[in-house]
Image (cartoon, coloured by chain):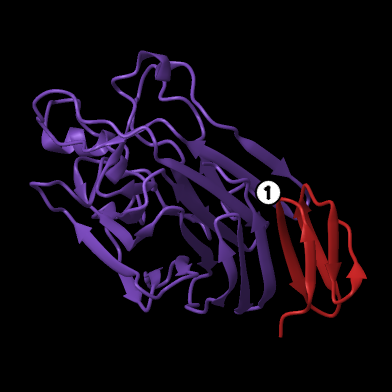
Chain colours: A red, B purple
Amino acid sequence: MVDDIVFKGRALLVRRGDEIRTSSVEAEKIEVGGKSHSG
Amino acid sequence: MRDKWGPDGQHLTFDGAAWGASHQHEDKLNFALYSHGRLLIGDPNIYSYAATELKHYFKSSRAHNVVLVDGKSQIRWYDPDARLATKGRNEWVSEDEFDFVSSVYCESFGVNTFKAEGPPELDDLIVHKRSIFYVKGEYWILCDVISGEDKGSHQFEQMFHPAPIFDRDADIPMLAGEVSIDDGVIRTADEGLGNLAIVQVDREGVTVTSKKGETNPAAGWYGVLGEFPAWEVSSHSGGAYPHRMDAVMFPMPPGSSEYPKVERLYSDAGMTAFEITGAGVNDVFIQCEPVLR
């Protein structure tokens, strides 16, 4: 199941475990499942 | 890019540099990959400077982990400016959990034939952009986009050179090892050693071929301890520009042949997105590109 992802930037890795973690390059906006993320 | 220092670490070296003033190979965007105590994807190097077909091969793009377009190699040898400078932007980001690199080859491509008469016809409208995202301690994501100006269909070869097994103390210090190809997955399959699975994101219309120790034309050689027959693997695909070839490169520890499934979510000229699941991974990757041409 892929969560809704909103991303504005260069590259994004979304890691889905007990909690969502993100790693990004030049990110201006990251939302996964309606929640904002940074990193 | 690396997770740590030492023989139990992982690292990938990437070439985004000028053609150079010595050891001039047509290999911009080439890489070498090491994990689980061995080199898994290598640079075939060069053994002899005699004017042989194999020397020509070792210097060519075909002998590197790059992309050929309609059989054409990168060609920079004719351009004196390429000795000290290269074109295109390089990117490098290193964080605790990942490394990211990208570079562009936007100099010339051409048919690079051994003992060709006269200089090759050059195509300087092809642009190859490559990026690699490294999830530290785990795996790499390789993204290639080839752009050009015409509307025709083209053939693309994404090259990989699985490194031979080297053990200086063994009776036979070099072995080519085993390579398995199944449904778009290229996998080294060497018992008792770490291995690598290269999982193509798009498998429809893609064929994978492997060659070892062929001549006329040369294919599948390694220039260490002599001119050694070694695996050369090509992932072939076709289509119009821009053409995308994405893959996940997943190292596996000794005794494991488990690698993740990769499913395409979206792609166009400016964006790629896919899901990587299984083998302990549950990730989504998205990358956005500026339009090159």
Q: Residue at x 36, y 46 (%)?
A: B150
User: Residue B240 or B74: which is nearer the viewer?
Assistant: B240
Image height of B165 relative to B69, above or below: below
Residue reaching furthest to the front: B151
Residue reaching furthest to the bottom: A1
State which quarter of the image contains the N terminus of chain B.
top right
User: Residue B173: percent from the left, percent from the top?
Assistant: 28, 51
Image height of B83 relative to B245, above or below: above
User: Residue B256: percent from the left, percent from the top?
Assistant: 50, 77
User: Residue B49: percent from the left, percent from the top?
Assistant: 19, 25
Q: Residue at x 13, y 53 (%)?
A: B214
Horizontally, residue B270 falls left or right of residue B119, namely right
Horizontally, residue B254 falls left or right of residue B137, namely left
Residue reaching furthest to the right: A35
Horizontally, residue A8 falls left or right of residue B85, namely right
Using a 10 Å C-alpha cutoff, classify the residue at mark 1 as few (fewer than 14 neighbours), some (14 to 19) or many (20 or more): many
Q: In which quarter of the image is residue B140?
A: bottom right
Image height of B72 relative to A4, above or below: above
The reply to whether residue B60 is in sight is yes
SS assignment at label 1 = strand
Q: In which quarter of the image is residue B51?
A: top left
User: Which residue is labeled 1 in the image?
Assistant: B99
Q: Which amino acid does the dot numbered 1 rest on?
A: Asp
